Structures are given as structure tokens and as C-alpha cells.
Image: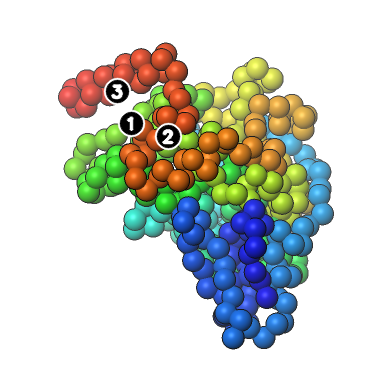
């Protein structure tokens, strides 16, 4: 029976919940907003299946990538609205063209994030773009298994732990599965996100949220919320309170402090990331719309990359400027104090108190906001 004694030992992949044959494991949110499983001992039949699919208990072996590539999707429109060089769209289109199914993270009605399955090109927009939240897996492993057993091609995208959870859940290799890992900095608290959203835009109706808007560039990206009425809230990401707190690790999930699924352990066929630092390492592969970094771990992954322009790069160079490759997200020294005061204090003030923004960044934020206001008036 699964039992969480230390919250560092649960990544929230939900594999145990879906694997339980008697459905005796429920999910609850703790005081920090993170979801954890809890088994009903009265219903549990002690089959051990929940423990057998846990990434924290049953780690997959470490692997080295077969190849590492710098990649840019040649479709400029797709590149403009995508993260990681637009490679996700390229892969997904190939799967969908063959009557396949694509699983990925999409916004929910309350602008939290959960996994869904799509079957059409038109639905791809729901899955594009980085979403700096932990996506609720819900029953998507079960759904993916159902499609796989019918012979349909399935592309499943997720963070390292979500991909490893899927592999352990399935317990076998499927030739028609493409597992795509999205490099992860760590997953932030859903409670913090919802509180930030309420305090930032109140009860205004949201039309779209972009954590990595390229209006100010790929490398100098912005956090952007578009309201249904046409109004918008935009800040350079490095000045935005939520992004500042996220990248400072002050409200990340405890298990992210030692991820069990990185360094090739997830079981993915392909890993997608942004090629940060490509301008310095390989300026010939730099694209102002965004250069993607792709690692292939299987021949299946190699086959899927055929047809898109790829440039082979050294593994260590590719990892040099991307902290996401580290399996350790160092705990912020003020994390405990942050969550102790979260309920009573204004979240933006709280984040800025513990993750201070420089004077220069504050001035830059005012200049950017002024430019946005002028632009909106001109429109």
C-alpha cells in the first residue's frame, strides 16, 4: 500500500492512483497546494501494484542520448508561437497525420493545468507553449494504454517524472508509443499560482496566458495575460513576481529537490528543451525565434526526427547553459517562511520580499510597462 511519510518521496505523477485495481487511492491537496495520494486501508487488497509503478521507489536505469541536436522548425509561424524551437508541433503533426493521439498539458477552466488527449491538428494550440505549473495527469495513463492496445499511435508528452510514471504504469514496451520528455526546472505550487492569479487580475475574464511570450524576444521573453475584454497584463519574465519566485525555487514541489527521473532515467524516446546559450556556443544555429535542443534516446526517436533540419552538437555543450538538466533544484532558504505567511500576506509582496528584484530591473519594468500602455493606446 502506498503511504507517503516524507513528501520528498512523491513526485505527483499519479501512476499509483491509476494502477490500483480496486481504485482505493484518492488524491488530496496538502497545505501547500500539492497533490498527494492516500490509500484507503479498508479497501486495499495489498497487491503491491501501486508501489511497483512509483518512480521514487522503482527508478529506471540511466541512459545517455544517442544524439543531441540544435533544431529550429522551418515554419516561422509555428516557431513564433512555440517553445523549444517548435519541435513539439513537428512531432505531433506526424503522429496526428497517421490517425494517432497526442497527450499533453492544457489549461483548465480555472487556468490550472491538466493532461488531455487530442486527435486533430486544430487542437494542437491547446498543448503548445510552456506552462510553468504541474499538470494533473488524472486518468491519462489509462487512456493512453487503451489507445495503445487498439494499435493507434500515441505521443505522450510530459515532465521527466510523468514520462517515467507512464513507463512504469504500462510495464511493457509499445512500438506505437512515442514518449516525449519536456525538460523541467521543477513544478510550482498550484495554490501559489491561483492566489497570484486572483491578486493580479481579480475577477476579470481571461482569454489567454503565456508564460513565454516572444513579443519581447525568445531569450528576453515576457509573462503575458490577455483579458477577454482586450486588456492585457505584460511583464518581462525576469521582473514578474510569479516567475521570479518559480525560478528562485521558493515554491517548488519538495520532490523536485532531488528528481528521480532526470539524467536519462525517464524512459523517454525524445527530450525537448530550449538551447540556451546557443548564440555563444554555435552562433550559426542561433535563431531569434528560438532554437530548440533535442536529445534522442531510442531508434524510434531518431526515426521521428527525420525530415526536420537538425545540427549535431556535443552533449556537454548543450547542457552548459541550461540548469534544467540538473536533477537537483536547490531548496530556497526562505521556503518555510514563505509558506507560513502565504495565507495572510499579499503574494506579490511576499515573493518580492524573499526574492528581491534589483533596482535596475524595477526601472526596466516601469519602462516596459509604459511602452505597452502607449502601444495599447495607439491600437
Query: Dot 1 corresponds to which residue?
Result: 234
- Rendered location of residue 328, percent (x, y): 68, 40
Circles 3, 1 touching at the beta carbon (< 8 Å): yes
Query: Dot 2 corresponds to which residue?
Result: 351
Query: For this rendering, which residue is in front, 364 or 334?
Result: 334
Q: Is residue 256 above or below residue 243?
A: below
Q: Distance between the Cα atoms at labels 3 and 1?
A: 7 Å
Describe residue 25's horizontal placement relative to residue 328 as left or right: left
Query: Dot 3 corresponds to which residue?
Result: 369
- Rendered location of residue 231, percent (x, y): 22, 36
Query: For this rendering, which residue is in front, 207 or 265?
Result: 265
- Rendered location of residue 85, percent (x, y): 56, 35
Query: For this rendering, which residue is in front, 206 or 24?
Result: 24
Can residue 84 be seen here? The reply is: no
Q: Earlier in the sequence, mark 1 or mark 2?
A: 1
- Residue appearing at x 74%, y 26% in the figure: 317
Q: Is residue 15 above or below residue 226?
A: below
- Residue appearing at x 48%, y 29% in the figure: 355
Amino acid at each position: 500500500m502506498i503511504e507517503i511519510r516524507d513528501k520528498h518521496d512523491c513526485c505527483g505523477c499519479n501512476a499509483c492512483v491509476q494502477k490500483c485495481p480496486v481504485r482505493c487511492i484518492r488524491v488530496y491537496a496538502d497545505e501547500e497546494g500539492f497533490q498527494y495520494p492516500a490509500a484507503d486501508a479498508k479497501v486495499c487488497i495489498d497487491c503491491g501494484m501501486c508501489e511497483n509503478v512509483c518512480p521514487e521507489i522503482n527508478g529506471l536505469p540511466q541512459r545517455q542520448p544517442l544524439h543531441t541536436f540544435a533544431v529550429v522548425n522551418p515554419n516561422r509561424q509555428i516557431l513564433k508561437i512555440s517553445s523549444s524551437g517548435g519541435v513539439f508541433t513537428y512531432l505531433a503533426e506526424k503522429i496526428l497525420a497517421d490517425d494517432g493521439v497526442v497527450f499533453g498539458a492544457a489549461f483548465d477552466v480555472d487556468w490550472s493545468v491538466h493532461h488531455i488527449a487530442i486527435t486533430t491538428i486544430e487542437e494542437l494550440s491547446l498543448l503548445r507553449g510552456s506552462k510553468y505549473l504541474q499538470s494533473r495527469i488524472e486518468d491519462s495513463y489509462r487512456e493512453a494504454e487503451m489507445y495503445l492496445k487498439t494499435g493507434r499511435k500515441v505521443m505522450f508528452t510530459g515532465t521527466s517524472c510523468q514520462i517515467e510514471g507512464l513507463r512504469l504504469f504500462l510495464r511493457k514496451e509499445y512500438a506505437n508509443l512515442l514518449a516525449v520528455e519536456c525538460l523541467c526546472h521543477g513544478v510550482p505550487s498550484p495554490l501559489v499560482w491561483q492566489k497570484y492569479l486572483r491578486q493580479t487580475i481579480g475577477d476579470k475574464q481571461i482569454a489567454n496566458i503565456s508564460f513565454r511570450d516572444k513579443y519581447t524576444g525568445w531569450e528576453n521573453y515576457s509573462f503575458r495575460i490577455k483579458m477577454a475584454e482586450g486588456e492585457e497584463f505584460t511583464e518581462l519574465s525576469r521582473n514578474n513576481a510569479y516567475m521570479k519566485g518559480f525560478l528562485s525555487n521558493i515554491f517548488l514541489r519538495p520532490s523536485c529537490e532531488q528528481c528521480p527521473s532526470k539524467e536519462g532515467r525517464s524512459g523517454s524516446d525524445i527530450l525537448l528543451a530550449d538551447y540556451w546559450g546557443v548564440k555563444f556556443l554555435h552562433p550559426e544555429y542561433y535563431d531569434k525565434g528560438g532554437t530548440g535542443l533535442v536529445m534522442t534516446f531510442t531508434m524510434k526517436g531518431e526515426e521521428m526526427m527525420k525530415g526536420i533540419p537538425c545540427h549535431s552538437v556535443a552533449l556537454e555543450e548543450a547542457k552548459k547553459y541550461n540548469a534544467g538538466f540538473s536533477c537537483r533544484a536547490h531548496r530556497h532558504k526562505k521556503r518555510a517562511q514563505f509558506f507560513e505567511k502565504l495565507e495572510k500576506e499579499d503574494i506579490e509582496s511576499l515573493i518580492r520580499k524573499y526574492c528581491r528584484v534589483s533596482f535596475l530591473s524595477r526601472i526596466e519594468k516601469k519602462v516596459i510597462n509604459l511602452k505597452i500602455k502607449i502601444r495599447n493606446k495607439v491600437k
